[in-house]
Amino acid sequence: MGHPSVLLWLSLVFIEGSNAFLATISRTHQTTNVYHNVRTCVTLNSNQRVPSNIKQFVNTKSRTISFRSSSVSWLSASANGASSSSSSYDEVCDVLVLGSGPAGRAIASLLGSSKVGMDVVVADTNFDTEWVPNYGVWSDEWDAILQAYQSFGIELKGGSEGGCIDHEWNVTDCYFGGSFDIPMEQRMRLERPYKRVDKNALQESLSTGFRHVNAKHISKAINVNMYSPAGSLMHDEDGTTIQLRKGDGSMMTVRTKLVIDSTGHETKLVLRDTRDPYTSPGFQIAYGALVEIDESDAPDKSQVGPYAKEAMTLFDYRTDHFDDETMLTKAESAPTFMYAMPLKGNQIFFEETSLVARPGVSLQECKDRCDIRLKHHGIKVAKVVEEEFCYIPMGGALPIRDQRVIGIGGAAVMVHPSTGYHLCRCLMGATAMASAIQKEMNTQQPNLDKVAASAYHALWSPENTRQRNFAVFGGEFLMKQNVVGLRGFFDGFFKLPLELWGGFLAGWPGLPNNDAHESWLARIWFGLNFIARIPLPVALDMAASIAAYSISEGVPLPQSVTPFLGEPYSYEYDRNTDNVGDVAVKTEARKMIADSKVTKDVPVAFDEEAYAVEEEKVAA
Ligand SMILES: Cc1cc2nc3c(=O)[nH]c(=O)nc-3n(C[C@H](O)[C@H](O)[C@H](O)COP(=O)(O)OP(=O)(O)OC[C@H]3O[C@@H](n4cnc5c(N)ncnc54)[C@H](O)[C@@H]3O)c2cc1C
């Protein structure tokens, strides 16, 4: 207990109470071997051996500083169940991606692409399972995704239309009849093409650039960077050691620099920040069915009931198909709409969807309403080819700061909080994250906490968080609307210029039209235009809701539409870790303690060289 370094630590806790500072002053110098390959750089203590499974590394000598006295080099990480020798790692990689849904495969392909060139392993026991969701996307958004992936050397290809697309509609239809004098049969046609993603082609296109292990993680975060069961996931300065359970039940140990969690909305590793203001998630629930219809006595084969085959029907919010009063009342207060994609021949995908609700509408309710609607329109289902049960959590708290595990996709709450769109946001966000990781990892000695912070920042910059806060309010407003309110809302919404409504639906940097929502001024412009186009009762309700929400939820909404009230928090490492307190005074204190003539009994046993390095850094 009387060791000088302990005394030094205690005195400095008194001075500044900063972990970052503690780490800095307890520097020790070590001579190390640095092993390079074309993709990566790992640091080994001189007494450690290179494991046989990383033969490709070329040995070059260099001198480095270990930033923590307690640090362990990554190949010697050992505690509570993790392997103690390098040979017992079953896999060694730069990046371990947990989960192989769209988010996981996207980030794995990008980081493993020729442009980034990291050694990536994807772990998922469902790796070979076909994706369930049928993804619908706006054509221009998809084109932006194709381009973004091309810039990493990744071709999204396949599908009968190419570019991972199996169908494209040039126009998109909506039906909001039944309220505000909108005739029941009135169709609103949007001149904006829509596409159906060929999910198998996308899955296939995002399958290169990484290795795969048939295993899943077993850990659960119990606090920031702490996991249960003990020893199943441990971070240290140079990486992470994680235990995975293989498909056959046996365990494996992976040593990696970075862990990316793409296990979806129900992640057990990415903690959410429930300290700052946030609203609970809502849920999009939908029953979908790909069906073949019996058209033998259909009078017009260019139509499927009321739906034109040349168009994709985005919203049919009409309720005239209910004869039963109880069902009608329920459908009016907890509305669902029909989303219909006519495919080849007599195939059509129908999805009865509750846009967002809390609690969610039951799936059985959606299925029953779908059946009633189809019967009402005289649509005869000959065969159900596929069924889809859609459950999408929307909104909720963002990931907490300073986590070493990097979240993406559902795990990083990337779903649009008022529409449920996710795919394009997630794919585009992955490109920004990959670039951020590449940049940080290319530095001389990557600080992995900083890498993780920059990865989160690439998704949730303060500006993007502000934009999201605006959309979260949108979701809350939609959730409390009955069917009349929703018809009025969307009728006005789609009368806006395309860039205004398209930008709201995109809601992600890099997607087309998003610049019409990226600044507070743009959002105010959108709001004023919108409120002028919706029916008076809906406009009044919206004004009252804005006031009530701002009172109950505090700054997020006013902050999203004004330049006042500061910024949402930043994930950037420098801001929340390095620059704690007054760095200049702390440096001065260090120097004065060292120079003091009367403090010879106070521990000032700074490592001279480390101190000089720190001084230089602060001066720079
Ligand atoms: C039916 C349906 C329809 C949808 N339609 C659309 C749409 O039209 N447009 C749109 O933009 N969005 C749509 N969405 C939303 C979007 O599909 C989801 O939000 C998206 O699938 C989430 O992607 P993800 O990669 O984050 O997670 P997921 O797709 O949920 O993938 C998670 C992966 O993690 C794996 N995993 C889980 N636990 C572990 C573990 N312990 N260790 C390792 N791996 C693990 C799972 O096996 C899975 O492969 C739809 C969603 C559903 C359910």
Image (cartoon, rainbow, N blue to C red):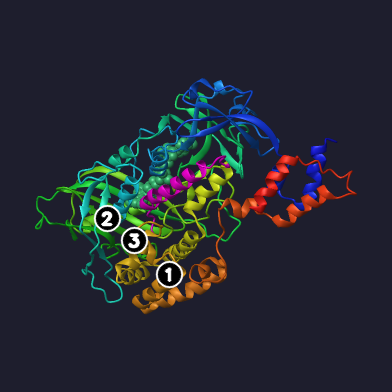
The reply to whether the magenta stretch includes residue 141 is: no
Local SS, label 3: helix
Seen in the picture, residue 400 relative to 278 is either above or below; the reply is: above
What is the distance, in whole Å, between disc 1 and disc 3 at their CAs?
A: 38 Å
What is the distance, in whole Å, between disc 1 and disc 2 at their CAs?
A: 24 Å
How many residues crowd mark 1 within 10 Å: few (<14), some (14–19), many (20+)? many
Seen in the picture, residue 253 relative to 477 is either above or below; the reply is: above
- Residue placed most toward the observer, 532 or 162: 162
The circle drawn on residue 144 is: none
Mark closer to the observer (1, 3): 1
Q: Mark 2 or mark 1, which is nearer the start of the sequence?
A: 2
- Residue placed most toward the observer, 231 or 129: 231
Q: Mark 2 or mark 3, which is nearer the start of the sequence?
A: 2
* x and y percentages locating residue 162 in the rendered image: 22, 45
Q: Disc 3 residue type? A: Met
Q: Quadrant of the N terminus?
A: top right
Magenta stretch: give its range: 419-447
The circle drawn on residue 523 is: 1
Dominant secondary-structure state across the stretch colored magenta: helix
Counting labels gives 3
The reply to whether the magenta stretch includes residue 425 is: yes
Mark closer to the observer (3, 2): 2
Residue drawn at (39%, 62%) of the image: 334
The circle drawn on residue 327 is: 3
Q: Which image quadrant for residue 181?
A: bottom left
Local SS, label 1: helix
Q: Which residue is mark 2?
A: 139
Residue drawn at (65%, 49%) of the image: 617
- Residue placed most toward the observer, 430 or 575: 575
